[in-house]
Amino acid sequence: MAVADTQNRTLGLFQSTVLNMIDMVGIGPFITMPIVIGLLGGMYLWAWVAGAVLSFIDAMIWSELGAAYPMAGGSYNFLKVAYGEKGAGKMMSFLYVWQTIIQAPLVAASAAIGFAQYFIYLVPLQVWQQKLLSGAVIIFVTFLLYRKVESIGKIGVLLWLGVVGTLGWIIFGGITHGNFTQPLFDAKNNFNINTIASFLFGQACVKTIYSYLGYYNVCHLGGEIKNPGKNIPKSMFISIIAIAVLYLAMNVSVTSVIPWQEIKAWQVADTKTFVISTFIERLYGHNAAIVITIMVLWVALASLFAVMLGYSRVPFAAARDGAFFKIFAKLHPTKNFPYISLLVLAAFAFVFSLLFRMGDVISGILAMRIMVQFIGQGVGLMLLRKRKGTRELPFKMPFYPFPVLLAIAMWLFVFYATGTVVIISFAVVLCSGLVVYFVKAKMKNEWPFVITNDYLEDNIKNIGSG
């Protein structure tokens, strides 16, 4: 089942793990922390644990697929192979690219909105001014990307150093100045099993899982990973554990200085969305808070740059493969980058940043991914195992199929927790994607409107055996 190693693989375990962790940590943890506390109060740490658990279990699915099919494209290729390259795989891979046109701009919008939320610590702005700023950030990053990008390795290293420096400063501040163990006692004393199964807890998990997303980035870089059968799974599991420790330590650090009750009150009143700035201000003064705010803004801007760069290549690659609209395969005539794909995603991101609030954007990101990408891959993996067996799998998850079934059940719970409006929005996107695919398939005489030789042979065998 493993794909032959025909490419020049240059990324080892360390490099692939660092790239994974960079993709996981953007503006997410800085903006979702107060939202989660506002939803759950003293039980907020349990939502971060739950997010890590789901990510770890889902990473088992990604590990089997990524190790067996280590090629660029990740989910696009996994869905195509799992459901049949000449059959339903065409539809599933198309739907993945279709939903990417919506969810990728939502990811970009979340970074831009988060940027505006922290910028108001430096310059007070009214709501409409914040909206304009988030839109301007999208335009600025698009301008930066409207050129040939030879390498983002240096940008990745700088981003990682900024992330580590920011989180390290926050954690150090809590350890040295706060009552670092008190939030742990609060989490224990406020634990309620009924809350774990509640819609409210699901909403909080939507926010924490958003902050963990990216643990599978190494699968999208599969064609560049050395010894992918071992390094792809290892990099994901190491990344999730390391980031979970950092996120938990950051939450404990902040709430050891600013009690969760105070942060919850801010969230209810929709004030002081820049919690990290306030945290550093209490410890080191206003000048230090300005520095940490600039660091958070830099992380948000850099992560937005990476998001727009990476996602703009998904519709482009699918179009080049003949699975999406040809116009997305166009390269800039002089700068040689997929400018149509970039401009379309940027236009959607600009509109989303003006229209939506942070909580709605995060819920939309999860809803757009869960059914086609995450659950679709879980079902697809079971189909692959049934069709091809496990003898040639470089990585086999323990206790199969329990992790797959558990991941699907947890994803369904999170999908339900995104809310009725978001679920309806997803249904509209999915149905529109299905309509467009079937019209396109009919025009190009593709599945399900063409009967392949494989299909005929299978039916002849069935008739003969009957």
Image (cartoon, rainbow, N blue to C red):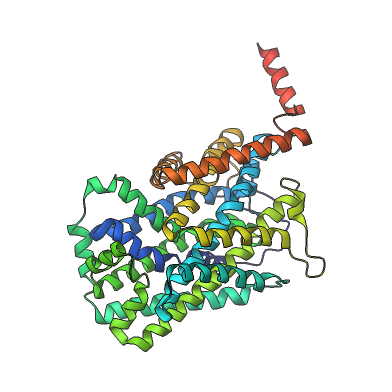
- Give the left or right position of residue 283, taking residue 58 as reference: left
Q: Residue at x 29, y 60 (%)?
A: 38
Q: Quadrant of residue 276?
A: bottom left
Front residue of this view, candidates 135 and 364: 135
Q: Residue at x 23, y 45 (%)?
A: 194
The part of the image, by quadrant, that contains residue 293 is bottom left
Number of numbered markers: 0
Q: Kindly give the residue lying farthest to the right in the view shown.
A: 333
Q: Is residue 389 above or below residue 140?
A: above
Residue 78 in percent (x, y) is at: 61, 46
Q: Position of residue 22 (x, y in %)?
A: 52, 68
Q: Quadrant of the C terminus?
A: top right
323 vs 276, left or right, is right
Asked if residue 214 can be seen in this view, the reply is no
Task: Give left or right: position of 173 versus 406.
Answer: left
Looking at the image, is 56 positioned above or below residue 250?
above
Name the residue located 49 percent from the left edge and 46 percent from the top edge: 370
Is residue 295 among what the camera can see?
A: yes
| Residue 228 x, y percent position in the rendering | 60, 57
Q: Residue at x 61, y 36 (%)?
A: 388
Query: Could you tell whether 252 is left or right of 27 in the image?
Result: left
- Quadrant location of the N terminus? top right
Q: Residue furthest top?
A: 466
Q: Position of residue 275 (x, y in %)?
A: 34, 72
Q: Nearer the viewer, residue 396 or 437?
A: 437
